[in-house]
Amino acid sequence: MITFFTIPKAWHGSNAARQRNAVASWRALGARVLLFGDEPGVAEAATELGADHVPTLERNGHGTPLLDGVFAEAHRLAPDGLICFANTDILFAADLLVAADAAATVAPRMLVVGESWDTDVHGDIDFRADWQRALAQGRKRGAGALDWFLFTHGIFETIPPFIVGRAAFDNWLVWRARDLGAAVVDATPVVHAIHQAHDYGHVSGGFDTTRRGAEAAANWKLIGSKARVYTRFDATHVLSRSGLRHNFGATFRAKERARKLIWKLRHGQLLPARTPR
């Protein structure tokens, strides 16, 4: 049994279509779904889609939801089985269930993560058809851009009051699981999670604000150190089509260090500064 929980945006326009698609894909897996918040249209959508509506959540001074209370309440409402926190624009198919079954054999406490594929999706999806084939493959969002977390109890009952949708809390979750000695499984080779592409008009200042604004700075302060910014490359295990294996080099963060080095080379951050003439 998997219980999904998420914090939807206001349920109107293109947001409504994306969120309806996402929740419908989760419900098609036989999962229970918790929709947090009192944004317009969310309660009605919960009724329509067979989800549970949890209207109360804490917000910061900007009105942006905080995650600590949401995670705690999700654990309380779902005392059994696996829990999955996902952004309300992520589509899943049955390969998530395959990954969940495989990862459950690793350790009593585990976290499953993976990259998602940025894909243009228009309108409502007919989940009775072979819907995945009908969607363009898109492109991977990056090893550090994590949109979903499937986990057991005993890891995230208590987390800092991170601001949803802002920088780095997703990477902290991977670090937290590793720090507690839980198994972390990178299921990217198996789970084709689809991120329905969208703009950031719902955020004042757009995408850059989510990375560098005041709220992002608040998340960075809660994290405490850049050394706690983990990606899927820091997983203890990798799930591929041929099965589950140890992620060799994870102890010394070899893949993640290589990824950062390549990024810096591509962006010219390792070049010596030019001396003004």
Image: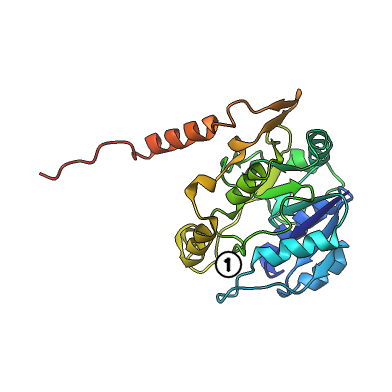
Numbered marks: total: 1
Frontmost residue, 150 versus 140: 150
Quadrant assignment, res 235:
top right
> Is residue 96 rendered to the left or right of residue 178?
right
What residue appears at the point 59 percent right and 73 percent down from the top-left corner?
60
153, above or below 206, in the image: above
> Is residue 253 rendered to the left or right of residue 136?
left
The secondary element bearing badge 1 is classed as loop
Q: Residue furthest front?
A: 180
Number of residues whose C-alpha sits closer than 10 Å to that of mark 1, classed few (under 14), some (14–19) or many (20 or more): few
Q: Which residue lies furthest to the left in this view?
A: 277
Q: In this orientation, does residue 69 appear?
A: yes
Frontmost residue, 89 versus 248: 248
Which colouring convention does the figure follow?
A: rainbow
Q: In this orientation, does residue 146 appear?
A: no
Frontmost residue, 143 versus 159: 159
Which x, y percent locates residue 205?
47, 66
Quadrant assignment, res 251:
top right
Frontmost residue, 267 versus 270: 270
What residue appears at the point 59 percent right and 31 percent down from the top-left corner?
250
10, above or below 241, in the image: below
Which x, y percent locates residue 118?
62, 45
What residue appears at the point 50 percent right and 60 percent down from the top-left corner?
221
Residue type marked 1:
His
What residue appears at the point 56 percent right and 77 percent down from the top-left corner?
61
Quadrant assignment, res 180:
top right
What residue is disc 1 on? 202
102, above or below 46, in the image: above
